[in-house]
Image (cartoon, rainbow, N blue to C red):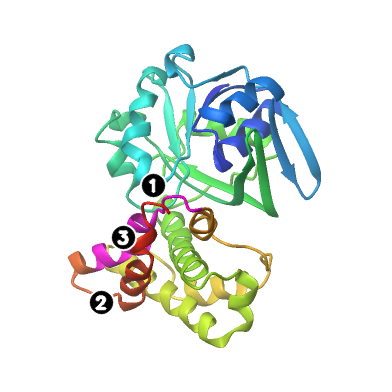
Amino acid sequence: MKFATVATGGIGGYLAVKLTQAGESVATLARGAHLDAIRSKGLTLETSDGSATIHPSIATDNPAEIGPVEAVIFGVKAKDIERTAESCIPLIGPDTVVIPFLNGVETVERLATILPLENIANGTAGVSTTIANPGKIKQVGTFATFTFAERDSTQSPRIKAVRSAFERAGVDAPVVEDIDVELWRKFCVFTSMSGVTAAARCTLGEIKIDPHLSRLFQDGMAETAALGRALGVNLPDDMEDRVWRGISGLPDNLRASTAIDLEAGRALEVDWISGAVARLSDAAGIDAPIHRTLNAVLQPWKNGR
């Protein structure tokens, strides 16, 4: 298949390497020093199993040089959705599928203000990756699952084709019955992971052993889950308990991208994470004091240092 990664950060870079290794054609959209490094030295993925370097079919900051593709892997910061979506327009053909893998639950609606709705699918990624240096993507831990479907959760021919490409690349891409449940399941975890690791300047390991942080994390998940259920998402009643038990198996050094961005002085996605829980809860007429507080604490840094 012919893929384009927009852009080629942690998510896009991870998939660009995996798919290229499997023989798929992947064009990478990047900019600045990251693009320069990809062009000169290739794109490197570092994992616990070692490192791999690929040379994309195209590495550019101009999407017109790529042209229409079969699938766009859309992975950017939530604050950049509309601006980056405009760069996808030259990549869109009649049957192109745009699969978003980013944080938040408002992505499809925001993409649809720029791109044709019929080209937009829905997805969520369970992986911890970041740009360690220009041209180098680093994965923390070994978990990596990519869940996607059409917006109505159907498995269309184009979705099946992308899944087959992922499977050939050794990328876990399970079939799901309800993409909204999967999206909100991740959102429940990520809103707490993001807010707590950033606000407390801590790791997941510290959350596990500190009773105050553990309670804060779990209460934050419960708030987000309550919002999802109020909005009609069919989240299992025991989801929060099962997710919290599963967290014990995640790496202790794990932090959300929000915490990493805060430390680096970069702009934060807080408006679309804890801020979104607070905002959407207000609109739904329910209270969200945990995320309202986490949002407030992080607001002074949302535009970077």
At horizontal 37% and vertical 58% (from top left) the residue drawn is 270
At horizontal 24% and vertical 35% (from top left) the residue drawn is 113
Which residue matches tag 3?
276
**SS category of the residue bearing label 2:** loop
Q: Earlier in the sequence, mark 2 or mark 3?
A: 3
Residue 258 in sight from this viewpoint:
yes
Counting other residues with Cα less than 10 Å from the Cα at mark 2, is it few (<14), some (14-19), or many (20 or more)? some
Q: Which mark is residue 78?
A: 1
Counting other residues with Cα less than 10 Å from the Cα at mark 3, is it few (<14), some (14-19), or many (20 or more)? many
Q: Are marks 3 and 1 in contact (CB under 8 Å)?
A: no
Q: Are marks 2 and 3 in contact (CB under 8 Å)?
A: no
On screen, residue 261 versus residue 25, left or right, reads left
User: Quadrant of the rendered structure where residue 251 is?
Assistant: bottom right
Quarter of the figure that contains the C terminus = bottom left
User: Quadrant of the rendered structure where residue 161 is?
Assistant: top right
Q: CA distance from mark 2 to mark 3?
A: 13 Å
Q: Earlier in the sequence, mark 3 or mark 1?
A: 1
Which residue matches tag 2?
287
On screen, residue 211 versus residue 286, left or right, reads right
As drawn, the residue found furthest toward the front would be 305
Which kind of residue does numbered mark 3 sit on? Ala
Q: Measured from the top left, where is residue 203 in percent x and y?
A: 61, 69
Which kind of residue does numbered mark 1 sit on? Ala
Q: Earlier in the sequence, mark 1 or mark 2?
A: 1
Depth order, front residue of 193/34: 34
**SS category of the residue bearing label 1:** helix
Q: Are marks 1 and 2 in contact (CB under 8 Å)?
A: no
Q: CA distance from mark 1 to mark 2?
A: 24 Å
Q: Measured from the top left, where is residue 195 in percent x and y?
A: 44, 67
